[in-house]
Amino acid sequence: MSFCLPPTRLILNDLTAADLCNIQAIARDPDFRKYVLIWLDTNEQIAAFLQHAMEEAKKTEGRLDYVLAARDRTTREFLGLTFIEIDPAQKSTAEIGIVLLPAFCRNGYGSEILREFLRFGFETLGMHRVYGKCDEQNLASARMMEKCGLVYEGTIREHVWLRDHWRSTRYYGMVEREYRQLTSISR
Ligand SMILES: CC(C)(COP(=O)(O)OP(=O)(O)OC[C@H]1O[C@@H](n2cnc3c(N)ncnc32)[C@H](O)[C@@H]1OP(=O)(O)O)[C@@H](O)C(=O)NCCC(=O)NCCS
C-alpha cells in the first residue's frame, strides 16, 4: 500500500524487511521509550512486530492493521512509524498512532500524517470513530491531536506501568459527523 499526500512532502507505505533497522532506531528513541505503549524492547519483539505488519500488508481483504512507514516523498528517507488499526471487536472504530524519529519532529509532519489518516479512516475505511491516545505527559502528541480537530474525551489514570512510571492516558477522538463538518469548513 502506498499513500501519497498531495501536495505534501510525505508518503506512507507498507513496511518491508529492509525497515528492521528503522524500527530499531525508533525503539531506541528516548521519547518512544518514555511515551509509547508498544513493546519493542527486545530484538525478538521488534522482529515479531515487523513480521505482523508485513503479514497484514499481504491481506487483500479483512485487513485490520495498517502499520506504515512515513517516508520523504522525494528521497524515500524513513521519517517514522505510523499505524491505523481497526478494532476487531468493533469494526467501525480505528485507532491511530504516529512516532517520528527525533530529527523529524516539530516540522508539521505529524499533523500532515494525522490528517491523512482521518481522511483514510473516514473516507476509505468508512469508520464511524477514529481515536488516538497518549501519555498525559506527552504534550506534543496531545497538541497534534487537538490541532487536527480531535476532541479530548478523558483520561484513564495510572492504568499501566510504562517502563519507569505509571502511565495515565489521555484519549482524543473524532466521529464521522465531526469529520464531515471539519472538511466542509476547510473546503
Ligand atoms: C507526537 C509527534 C508525532 C508529533 O509530530 P510533530 O511532527 O512533531 O508535530 P507537528 O510538527 O505537526 O506539531 C503539532 C503541534 O504540536 C506542537 N508540538 C510539537 N512538539 C511539541 C512539544 N515537544 N511540546 C509542545 N508542543 C509541541 C506543535 O507546536 C504544533 O502545534 P502548533 O501548530 O499549535 O504550534 C512527534 O512529536 C513524535 O513522534 N514524538 C515522539 C513519539 C511520540 O510521542 N509519539 C506519539 C505517541 S502517542
Image (cartoon, rainbow, N blue to C red):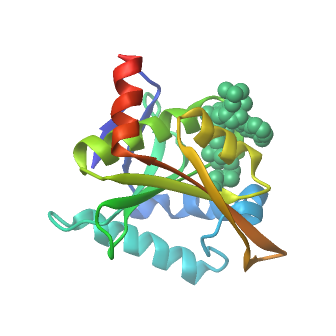
Judged from this view, the residue extending furthest toward the bottom is 44
The residue at 64%/58% (across/down) is 154
The answer, for residue 174, to whether it is visible in the render is yes
| Residue 116 falls left or right of residue 77 | left
Position of residue 165 measured from the top left corner of the image (x, y, whole percent): 84, 74
At horizontal 32% and vertical 74% (from top left) the residue drawn is 88
Depicted 145 relative to depicted 172: above or below:
above
Q: Is residue 68 above or below residue 42?
A: above
For this rendering, which residue is in front, 32 or 162? 162
Tally of numbered discs: 0
Q: Is residue 106 visible?
A: no
Judge by depth and name the residue closer to the eye, 79 or 135: 135
**Residue placed farthest to the top in the image?**
187
Residue 71: x and y in percent read: 47, 40
Left or right: where does residue 174 sit relative to residue 98? left
Q: Quadrant of residue 27?
A: bottom right
Q: Residue 76's image quarter?
A: top left
For image coordinates 48% across by 44% down, the residue present is 70
Quarter that holds the C terminus: top left
- Of residue 82 and residue 28, the one placed in the foreground of this image is 82
Q: Quadrant of residue 155?
A: bottom right
Q: Residue at x 47, y 26 (%)?
A: 9
In front of the other: 130 or 46: 130
| Residue 172 position within the rendered picture, expressed as x and y whole percent measured from the top left | 57, 51
Extreme left residue here?
60
Figure quadrant, ligand 1: top right
